[in-house]
Amino acid sequence: MAGHRIGLLVSLFLLEVLLLDAAKILTVSTLSGSHYIMMNRLSQILQDHGHNVTSLLNEMVFTPEFKEEKTSYRVINWRLPEDQQKEIDKRIQLTVEELIAYDRFKHHTIVKLYETFADLCSHLLSRKDIMDSLRNENFDLVLLNSLDLCSLLLAEKLGKQFVVFHPMQSTSMDFRLPRDLSYVPIYSSSLTDQMDFWARVKNFLMFFDFSMKQREILSKYDGTIQEHFAEGSQPLLSDLLLKAELWFVNSDFAFEFAHSLLPNTVYVGGLMDKPIRPIPQDLEDFIIKFRDSGFVLVALGSIATMYQTKELIKEMNSAFAHLPQGVVWACKDTHWPKDVSVAPNVKLMDWLPQTDLLAHPRIRLFVTHGGMNSITEAIQHGVPMVGIPFYGDQAENMVRIEAKKIGVSVQLETLKAETFAHTLKEVIEDKRYKSVAMAARAIRRSHPLTPSQRLVGWIDHILQTGGGAHLKPHGVQQPWHVQNLLDVLLFLLGLTLGTWWLLKKMLGLLLRSLGVTRKEKKA
């Protein structure tokens, strides 16, 4: 009995210590789809490591599987009035359809999407009940998504320190990382880190194009800022990006090109990693039928899957029919064309355990849309890839996969059954792809700390030290021309030219005076 009492007292003491050290953290997401899922994962990791997490979520369209997740942290759901919510949902859906149907990354469509997000933001900031409730909570820290620009304004309104999670590769947003343009490709340039002269010219010009595009996106929130912040205290979104205590980037150097990082930038790619579980028996029975040939996993992401055309499904299905492997394909019955017969080696599933299948010993290939989380999971298990990018960062992600020889990319617009089947067979049969994928797996797994440990450890560091000012170089506050010493170069150039001009003038005067003297002597 005495031992039981001592154990109980020790447990209570430890619980009290944990509660004393626990911070109140607010996570924010007004975006949808995979952004919901990722912010859910971040919130759960912090909650599991002893913090008190509250998540502010907007109930929008495209939230696959999210509501089925069990969470131990507190969730505050909010939405617009019914008529306004339907209008916002419709605008977002039409914009996403336009992105996928017409171009993988069309800038004016992205701008249009952010105009909608800015309208949504105005409504959130005007919700006095929500804002007062959040202020009363007195949070220690806010964790937000970098693509969710409204959450920057929310953190500023609350007057709280914040850290930023960037769900894409680090070069896809300008938050003043060192820009070594000779070997760091600008986002959407489709370049690698090995550039010849003309590639460097392209990269240099695209730097200015990228900067102007980002400014245009940020400008869509100008009206929201003017409406909700008093004159004289209206922030610039570009300044708020630099105000973050830390930047967590959803990437890893097993995938990314090596480049310089600042002390307040931490790579945490792989946060979606979970313990591997046995797959359902019916799925195992299907895989076993193909013996040593193994199987191919096909998962094109929740949003992209919704907009697969009949022609695309038909071409892919026909290509899979030519493979000796089984094919496990995430595709809902409601999206499957009624006049297309499923290939005999294909198993369609509304939902599948992607991580568990990627870890299966008989997997031979992963056909993916090129989303960051899917790529990271494939690298974690050493699986070669064939990518079919649809929109956003997916094409740029596949540029890196191709450059590192982990897989190949297939253009959505030109995908045909015969060539697609040839590509699939090539990546499966050429053992070099598997070898490189396993090498990337070794890099990915050899970190001394897991992504979750890095996330929690750095957040704890910020909480214990009162912020990340000691991690921010002064250079991030400098204008681009100052940071790159263009003002110094211009001054030295002017000084050199001025000195040269002055010497030339003095020499001319000297020569003229000498000429006059000689003439006088001759006379």
Image (cartoon, grey):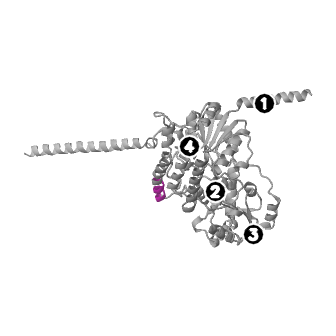
Q: Amino acid at mark 3?
A: Asn
The amino acid on which the numbered mark 4 sits, given as a three-letter code, is Cys
Q: CA distance from mark 4 to mark 2?
A: 23 Å
Quote the CA–CA distance across marks 4 and 3. 47 Å
Asked whether residue 431 is in view, the answer is yes
Contact, CB < 8 Å: mark 4 with mark 1?
Answer: no
Out of 439 and 427, give the one closest to the viewer.
427
Q: Indicate yes or no whether the magenta region holds residue 198.
A: yes
Which quadrant would the C terminus be assigned to in this image? top left
Element under label 3? loop
Q: Earlier in the sequence, mark 2 or mark 3?
A: 2
Quarter where residue 385 is shown: bottom right
From the image, tell me which residue sits under label 4: 121
Image spot of residue 220 (x, y percent): 49, 46
Label 4: few (<14), some (14–19) or many (≥20) C-alpha neighbours in 10 Å = many
Q: Earlier in the sequence, mark 4 or mark 3?
A: 4
Label 4 or label 1, whichever comes before in sequence order: 1
Q: Quadrant of residue 312?
A: bottom right
Q: Residue at x 89, y 30 (%)?
A: 4
Secondary element at image label 1: helix
Tell me which numbered mark, 3 or 1, is placed earlier along the sequence.
1
Q: Which mark is residue 345?
A: 3
Which numbered marker is on residue 336? none
Residue 452 left/right relative to 477: right
Q: Earlier in the sequence, mark 4 or mark 2?
A: 4
- How far apart in space, not on screen, are marks 1 and 2 (Cα)? 44 Å
Bin the neighbour count of mark 1 within 10 Å (Cα to Cα): few under 14, some 14-19, many 20 and up: few
Task: Determine if residue 251 is in view.
Answer: no
Q: Which mark is residue 14?
A: 1
**Closer to the camera in the image, 258 or 304:** 304
What are the residue bounds of the magenta stretch? 197-204
